[in-house]
Amino acid sequence: MTQELQGRRALVTGGASGIGEATARALAAAGAHVIVADLNGDAAEAVASSIGGEAWRVDLSDTVALEDVSLDVDILVNNAGIQHVSPIEDFDVERFRFIQRLMLEAPFLLVRAALPHMYAGGFGRVINLSSVHGLRASPFKVAYVTAKHGLEGLSKVTALEGGPHGVTSNCINPGYVRTALVEKQIADQARVHGIPESEVVEKIMLTESAVKRMVEPEEVASLVLWLAGDRAGMVTGASYTMDGGWSAR
């Protein structure tokens, strides 16, 4: 692989596993110095040490602590997130607020913290891991869908403000990705839909997709890598679906 990102500093949230880990490894292989940010400090340290990066143990839901953070990074990948499956009338209120803090307020604060450095250098890449649920809704995921729709707006405003300074901002919108986060949903989906766990992937997760398989984390990482490079300088304010055709309906 060419060292296209040599000399660049990147921050990947949720970087210790799943899409985040695949992304951290792809960016490092392209020459970037990667900061692996994760709540699980030991896992972040393990990934960081294996790619020659650094670890940042951080609770991104503690948004007050992020208000005064300053980030000297050229590439920001907002990836950290969780899921909670429940009907609205039963949805835990604090869980809703927690998801908004983690998946919408924290990305805003990290963008805010990174833009001064990006503006000063005349280069920046903000890459937001959204979801097909940033463009479409599904029942029983009110907090996640709300946060992802908000992330789309944050990304577009960042694109408009950052454009004159060499900063791009885009969303990547995968369908179901083969990660621990998705595996944990299977039991919850079976419960709320009243079907066996063995039927969840086919009947719930992939029912809208033309390509009947999950997205691999490395596939998402490959798109992050392209968006982070010089060749994507005219790509901004966009939402790149990687959903097997789900949003084509």
Image (cartoon, rainbow, N blue to C red):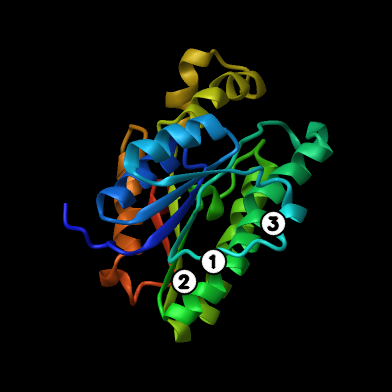
Give the residue type that dot 1 points to: Ser
Residue 70, above or below 233: above
Residue at 83% over, 39% down: 93
Closer to the chain start, of discs 2 and 1, is 1
Q: How many circles with numbers are drawn on the protein?
A: 3
Residue 207 spot, x, y in % from top left: 44, 33
Q: Is residue 70 left or right of residue 34?
A: right
Whether residue 215 appears in this view of the structure is no
Where residue 180 appears, as percent x and y from the top left, is 48, 27
Location of residue 84 by image quarter: top right
Q: Residue at x 77, y 45 (%)?
A: 97
Q: What kind of residue is marked 2? A: Gly
Q: Looking at the image, is mark 2 or mark 3 nearer the viewer?
A: 3
Q: CA distance from mark 1 to mark 3?
A: 19 Å
Q: Nearer the viewer, mark 1 or mark 3?
A: 3
Left or right: where 86 falls relative to 167: right
Q: Which residue is mark 2?
A: 237
Residue projecting furthest to the left: 1
Q: Residue at x 52, y 42 (%)?
A: 14
Task: Report how far apart the C-alphas of labels 2 and 1 lie in the structure.
Answer: 6 Å
Location of mark 3 (residue): 66
Mark 1 Cα within 10 Å, few/some/many (few <14, many 20+)? many
How much space separates mark 2 and mark 3, taking CA atoms? 25 Å
Mark 2 crowdedness (10 Å alpha carbons): few <14, some 14-19, many ≥20? many
Q: Position of residue 162 (x, y in %)?
A: 50, 79
Q: Is residue 131 above or below residue 19?
A: below
**Label 1 belongs to which residue?**
155
**Amino acid identity at mark 3:** Leu
Do callouts 2 and 1 mark residues in contact (Cβ within 8 Å)?
Answer: yes
Residue 100 image point, x, y percent: 71, 49
